[in-house]
Image (spheres, rainbow, N blue to C red):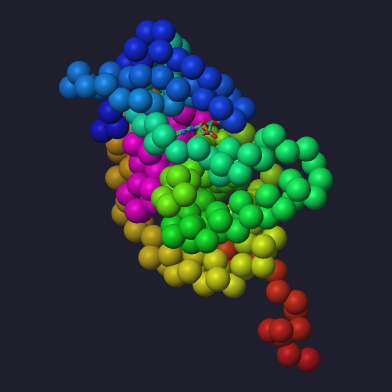
Amino acid sequence: MIQTAAIVPGSERPAGDGSTGAARCAIILPDGSRRAAVVKRGPIGQIAAEAFAALLLRAWGLPVPQPFLVEEDPHPAFASADDGYPSLKQRLGLHGLPPGEQRSRAEWVACRIAVGLRTAPLAAAADEAIANHDRNLGNILWDGASEAWIDHAYALGQGSLPDANKLCDMARAVQASEQLLRSAVAQALALNRDAVELAAQEVPTHLGAHSLATMVSQRIANVANALISRFPTPDDLFSGP
Ligand SMILES: Nc1ncnc2c1ncn2[C@@H]1O[C@H](COP(=O)(O)OP(=O)(O)O)[C@@H](O)[C@H]1O
Ligand SMILES: [Mg+2]
């Protein structure tokens, strides 16, 4: 079962570049040990999506910080172990740059780094499986060598962001489509289906993760084709006269 933690009173500080009020804090685990964490509050569906997605993506081998639930009224908050890395958006200083050529170039570099990360193909496949429409540069942590993938609040039918696989969009923008697509399709075909229900069983029943698991199970057979569809090709390449 996902661990339940308590926040050390008075330890919360704003976390940085998100939009939903994420806060850095200290948490106490059931065994009494303390960890640095980032806590997020929101609708119960988003908390469930965060917890279930973190467990599932970790089971699929993606580096996602360890998730926790924090008991609060009327429903739990979500916390994740603070990896200590900045996001790619912070690392490239994107929020400080006004729109213009310099910002566009910095975004290009950040996208190039994102799609070249070792686990980017798996992340693209996983995002397609969980319908994550929000893999922006603020949701990829990078310390210059290793990456971590965060923020699954707008996956699994939560929120109303337009349908997108942003890693695929980034790959197209930096002319790295073929490289990402080939590996992402291979990863998609290897996703372990049994991990989906197992991850849901790790989340307390009242959060409703089983319906989220059903959604992933229905999507999973189509992930490879869905990825291919993210990269439109000219009709004349494949269809004869
Ligand atoms: N586990 C974590 N480790 C390190 N930094 C984190 C972690 N979780 C969140 N952050 C930081 O907090 C910011 C906001 O968190 P995020 O989950 O993206 O929330 P939001 O929904 O507000 O975008 C992130 O962009 C990142 O800089
Ligand atoms: Mg975010």
Q: Where are the magenta residues, as a range?
A: 45-66
The answer to whether residue 206 shows anywhere in this view is yes
Front-lying residue, 117 or 98: 98
Q: Position of residue 102 (x, y in %)?
A: 76, 48
Residue displayed at 48% across by 46% down:
142
Which of the 4 image quadrants contains residue 111? bottom right
Front-lying residue, 38 or 231: 38
- Check the image and report above or below for 113 versus 88: below
Which of the 4 image quadrants contains residue 115? bottom right
Q: Is residue 51 magenta?
A: yes
Q: Position of residue 127 (x, y in %)?
A: 51, 51
- Check the image and report above or below for 134 versus 23: below
Residue displayed at 45% across by 45% down:
143
Q: Is residue 81 magenta?
A: no
Quarter of the image with the C terminus in it: bottom right
The answer to whether residue 213 shows anywhere in this view is no
Residue displayed at 72% across by 53% down:
105
Quarter of the image with the N terminus in it: top left
